[in-house]
Structure formats: C-alpha cells, structure tokens
Amino acid sequence: MSLEQAATYNEVSKISLQKLRYKDKKAGRSDRFRDDKVLLDFKNPFEIEISKLYYKAAFIAGSEKKLIKELSNELGLRRDSLRYYFKYFSFKHFKKAQRIKVALMKYCENSLWGDIEI
C-alpha cells in the first residue's frame, strides 16, 4: 500500500512514516518498507510469519514449555522473555525477531514432522 494510504489507515502522519522509512534504510531493515510501498501492519511485520512457525513448532514439540526450553538454550534468551514474545507476538527488535524466526525454522526442519502444514 502507498505511504499515504498507510498513514491514513494507521492514523499516523505521513512524515512520521517517512522518518521511519529513513531510519529503517539506515539500519539495513527491509521488512516494513519496499520501494514506495508500506506493509499494512508496519508496526509488527513478523507477527504472521512467526506465529505460523511457532504453532507448527509447538505442535512438533508436543508442548509449549518444551519448545521454549529448547529455544532458550539455543538462542541464549531467558524463558520468560520468549514466553512474552510468543504470548503477544510483539517483536520490536528486528535482529532478535530474525534470530527467533530462523531458530523456529531450523527446529521445524530438523524434526521428523517438519513437512506438516498448519
């Protein structure tokens, strides 16, 4: 969607989106803005992808507790923080969200049940 449409939809000013796009470009982020287009949910672009991967991995693990334990050991993050992330699916730190996404993908690929579609 265009910058103007995203500003109207999310009830923010166009200039704030332009500043955010500049900061993302400077930081090397490319998940919220592509060319002159903005994602509809630019505040939390990983929510849909990570939620699908999380539910698939939780199904494979058998319980959320087991999955969070294994991910915390692999990523070096506290279990409480991972629980919070997966409870609200709010990933504000781009690099941390990417690490979690990659860890979930590897977890699903390395299991016998990795080809299950959810």
Image (tube, helix red, strand yellow):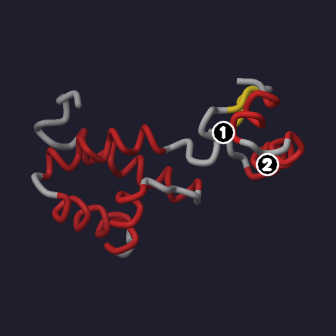
In the picture, the quarter occupied by the N terminus is top right
Q: Is residue 73 left or right of residue 48?
A: left
Residue drawn at x 62%, y 39% as measured from the top left: 31
Q: Give whichever of 71, 15 is nearer the camera.
A: 15
Question: Disc 1, disc 2: CB below 8 Å?
Answer: yes
Counting every numbered tag in the picture gives 2
Above-or-below relation of 117 to 70: above
Residue drawn at x 56%, y 56% as measured from the top left: 95
Residue drawn at x 23%, y 63% as measured from the top left: 70
Residue that numbered label 2 is attached to: 20
**Residue 27 in the image: x percent, y percent?**
75, 52
**Residue 103 in the image: x percent, y percent?**
36, 51
**Residue 25 in the image: x percent, y percent?**
78, 44
**Residue 62 in the image: x percent, y percent?**
10, 52
In the picture, the quarter occupied by the C terminus is top left
Considering the numbered disc 1 on the image, is that residue within a helix, a strand or a loop? loop
For residue 40, what is the image quadrant?
top right
Q: Is residue 50 left or right of residue 23?
A: left
Q: Is residue 33 left or right of residue 77?
A: right
Above-or-below relation of 15 to 4: below
Residue drawn at x 25%, y 44% as measured from the top left: 55
> Distance from label 1 to label 2 (Cα)?
9 Å
Q: Give whichever of 74, 40 is nearer the camera.
A: 40
First in residue order: circle 1 vs circle 2: 2
Residue that numbered label 1 is attached to: 32
How crowded pointer 2 is (Cα within 10 Å; few <14, some 14-19, many 20+) is rated as some
Considering the numbered disc 2 on the image, is that residue within a helix, a strand or a loop? helix
Q: Amino acid at mark 2?
A: Leu
